[in-house]
Image (tube, coloured by chain):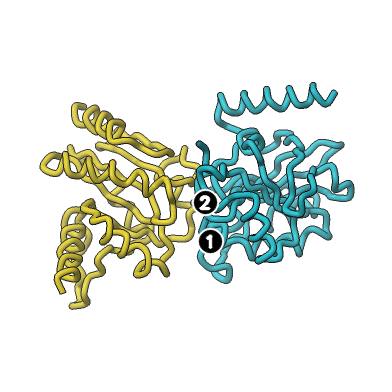
Chain colours: A yellow, B cyan
Amino acid sequence: MPVRRLFFLLSLLTLLQFGFAQPKTKEVAKPVPVVDFQGLKPFLSKDNDTVYVVNFWATWCAPCVVEMPHFENINKEFRSGKVKILLVSLDFPNHYDTRLIPFISSKNIQSSVVMLDDPNSNFWINEVDASWSGAIPATLIYKGNNRRFFEKVMTTEELKSNILSLLSQ
Amino acid sequence: MKRFLFTLMLVSAAVAAVFGQGYRIGDKAIDFSLKNVDGKMVSMADYPDAKGFVVIFSCNHCPYVMAYEDRMIEIHNLYASKGFPVIAINSNDPSVQPQDSYENMIERARDKKFPFAYLFDEGQKIYPIYGATRTPHVFLLRKQNGDLIVEYIGAIDDNYKDASAVKEPFLRNAIEALLAGNKPPVSETKAIGCTIKVK
């Protein structure tokens, strides 16, 4: 099962890259970790010299799907640098196997992906950014306390210029 | 007079577009005249007995809207007779999101047996004035001396996934408060939704 093995490796990479705790039991790790907001929160406020790019998206959100290659471009270009991309899927939990996993597989998404399953969005939207109305796609780019938030479709150029300016600070 | 009102509407649309804010709590909302799924034009002025309106920016395609359609129907069935009917508006540009065409609205309304008006914001004139950014996005209005005052903006409740797991039914609480002559306990909330599709 090479595909399953690939997913396992990808998931391991995601877990390692973002420091998700390793499962304690011998359960097979899900190819995409599912977290609630408390699980996601540590990755929205890392305080080091890396630039974090956190994109909120869903497979059913057409502009998000259009935007996806730009994040993949950035992931490829900055792979060796101090830049980390995290794609936070807001797909419905019951679409995990039927939509999210097939999408990641068919588009060969290389960036780290987690699924946020936390219905109390009235609480956590403001925690991500007070200016966010809740529409997706939305993207948070930050380094330490320097945070930039975009409630729109991003281009490779926009992502790159924001990343470079944060890296130089 | 009609031309003046139209100009005023365009000016306020332009102002809303420039400032990108839309309505805030306490603002006076404008009425509209939009085509319903039955082919007739609908305005809030057509409901002389209403005490207010539950205006919901909605659409056909968005999974979050679909998750809430039954609750929208329930709210209309509960509160229309008490003076707060639901009016749903689709502001999406069908050339960007073909599923949100007027024809598909008619089909969706028929399939779901919508008891409320489901209007097409042709030309996308209304949503920027209200400041709607996503679907579903609720604006609860209260009639006061002929004006329509914005009393609540935001989500229907705090759980899109499971109606039975809702802890705070924000919209119902707000309507109940208005019916009792009070202010909504929570006047603004946020929720994840689909963007309103613009070219």
Mark 1 element type: loop
Residue placed most toward the observer, A133 or B178: A133
Residue placed most toward the observer, B94 or B6: B94
The answer to whether A149 appears left or right of B186 in the picture is left
CB-based contact (under 8 Å), mark 2 and mark 1: yes
Residue visible at 72% across and 47% down in the picture: B183
Measure the alpha-carbon separation of dots 2 and 1.
9 Å
The answer to whether B20 appears left or right of A6 in the picture is right
The answer to whether A82 appears left or right of B80 in the picture is left
Q: Amino acid at mark 2?
A: Ala
Mark 2 element type: loop
Residue corresponding to mark 1: B160
Label 2 chain ID: B
What count of labels does the image hold? Answer: 2
**Residue B160, image x and y in percent?**
53, 61
Q: Please, is residue B114 above or below residue B28 in the view?
A: below
**Residue A76, image x and y in percent?**
17, 44
Residue corresponding to mark 2: B191
Q: Residues within 10 Å of mark 1 (few under 14, many from 20)?
A: many
Residue pushed farthest bottom? A26
Q: Residues within 10 Å of mark 2 (few under 14, many from 20)?
A: many
**Residue B140, image x and y in percent?**
70, 47
Q: Kindly tell me whether residue A81 is visible in this rendering.
A: yes
Label 1 chain ID: B
**Residue B153, image x and y in percent?**
63, 45
Residue visible at 26% across and 61% down in the picture: A105
Question: Residue A90 lies in what quarter of the image?
Answer: bottom left
